[in-house]
Image (tube, grey):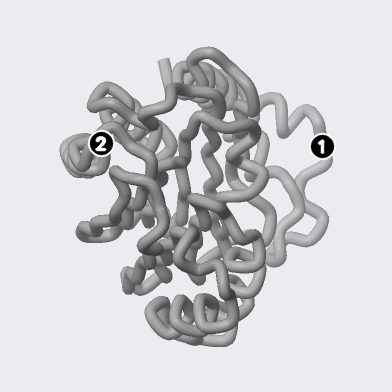
């Protein structure tokens, strides 16, 4: 009842997932990311443990195909599930159960994976992929949203629209960006607006937060404010 893209930005090393559906709060149950390791999207009649256990297996070094085989082997409901995985090396695997609702399927490209079910047609994924490839010059977050918008124009979820989400991780265990639109008449447009708002201060502020390399981060408010102001000015 959803379509999603998992991708890695070669310029930054970030791993991101964008997702949209005609269902409440898709960001709460579909996207899972282990920073610098890989991403998982579990959808259709979603099984949250595909994300939870799948990330554990990714961290242990298992390949995406092996992980999917392990997950579905222990799940009697796997024919009603859809999952796709991409690791930081670009290896991709997917499973679309035979009981998922048409149109359903998955495809992959260089550095990205797509999967969807209950879609208007296969062109939803095709156009999502084409837009992602075509917009290689865009900043990563905007590129992911633009790809999803193209899929929506191709028909999207055949039931309509309700929620969308964007999750991106970089070097740290905390997310670089975690945006959710849980209930909205035009969720991807609202997601796009929130991403734009994030560039007003948040994406510039995050580099001052504590990190593994600099455990205290930056606490001097004058330094933070000056740095944010300079970053915002450079965007204009």
Q: Crowdedness of circle 1 by 10 Å Cα count: few (<14), some, many (20+)?
A: few
Instruction: Compute the Cα span from label 1 to label 2.
Output: 47 Å
Locate residue 175 relative to residue 82 in the image: left or right.
right
Q: Which element type, helix, strand or loop, lies under badge 1?
A: loop
Examine the rendering and report whether any part of residue 232 can be seen: no
Identified at 31% across, 45% down, the residue is 102
Identified at 65% across, 67% down, the residue is 49
Residue underneath mark 1: 220
Residue underneath mark 2: 124
| Residue 108 at x, y percent in the picture | 24, 59
Locate residue 156 relative to residue 184 in the image: left or right.
left
Locate residue 137 relative to residue 171 in the image: left or right.
left
Find residue 150 and report its image quarter: top left
| Residue 32 at x, y percent in the picture | 58, 57
- Quadrant containing the C terminus is top left
Locate residue 123 relative to residue 102 in the image: left or right.
left
Find residue 35 and report its image quarter: bottom right
Find residue 208 and report its image quarter: top right
Q: Crowdedness of circle 2 by 10 Å Cα count: few (<14), some, many (20+)?
A: many
Nearest the viewer among 58 and 219 is: 58
Marks 1 and 2 close (CB-CB < 8 Å):
no
Identified at 38% across, 40% down, the residue is 118
Nearest the viewer among 122 and 192 is: 122
- Residue 83's disc number: none
Q: Which element type, helix, strand or loop, lies under badge 2?
A: helix
Nearest the viewer among 162 and 170 is: 162
Q: Is residue 83 above or below residue 4?
A: below
Q: Earlier in the sequence, mark 1 or mark 2?
A: 2
Identified at 72% across, 32% down, the residue is 224
| Residue 50 at x, y percent in the picture | 58, 67
Mark 1 or 2: in front is 2
């Amino acid at each position: 009842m959803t379509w999603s893209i998992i991708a890695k930005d070669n310029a930054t090393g970030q791993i991101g997932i964008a997702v949209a559906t005609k269902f409440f709060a898709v960001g709460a149950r579909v996207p899972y990311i282990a920073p610098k390791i890989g991403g998982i999207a579990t959808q259709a009649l979603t099984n949250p443990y595909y994300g939870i256990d799948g990330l554990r297996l990714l961290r242990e070094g298992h390949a995406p195909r092996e992980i999917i085989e392990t997950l579905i082997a222990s799940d009697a409901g796997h024919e009603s599930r859809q999952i796709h995985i991409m690791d930081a090396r670009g290896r991709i695997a997917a499973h679309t159960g035979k009981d998922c609702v048409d149109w359903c399927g998955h495809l992959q490209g260089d550095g990205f994976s797509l999967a969807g079910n209950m879609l208007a047609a296969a062109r939803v994924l095709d156009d999502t992929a084409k837009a992602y490839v075509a917009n290689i010059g865009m900043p990563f977050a905007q590129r992911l949203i633009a790809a999803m918008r193209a899929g929506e124009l191709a028909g999207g979820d055949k039931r309509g629209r309700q929620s969308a989400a964007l999750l991106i991780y970089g070097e740290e265990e905390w997310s670089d960006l975690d945006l959710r639109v849980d209930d909205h008449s035009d969720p991807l447009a609202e997601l796009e607006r929130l991403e734009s708002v994030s560039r007003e201060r948040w994406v510039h502020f995050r580099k001052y937060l504590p990190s593994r390399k600099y455990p205290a981060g930056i606490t001097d408010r004058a330094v933070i404010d000056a740095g944010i102001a300079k970053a915002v000015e450079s965007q204009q």
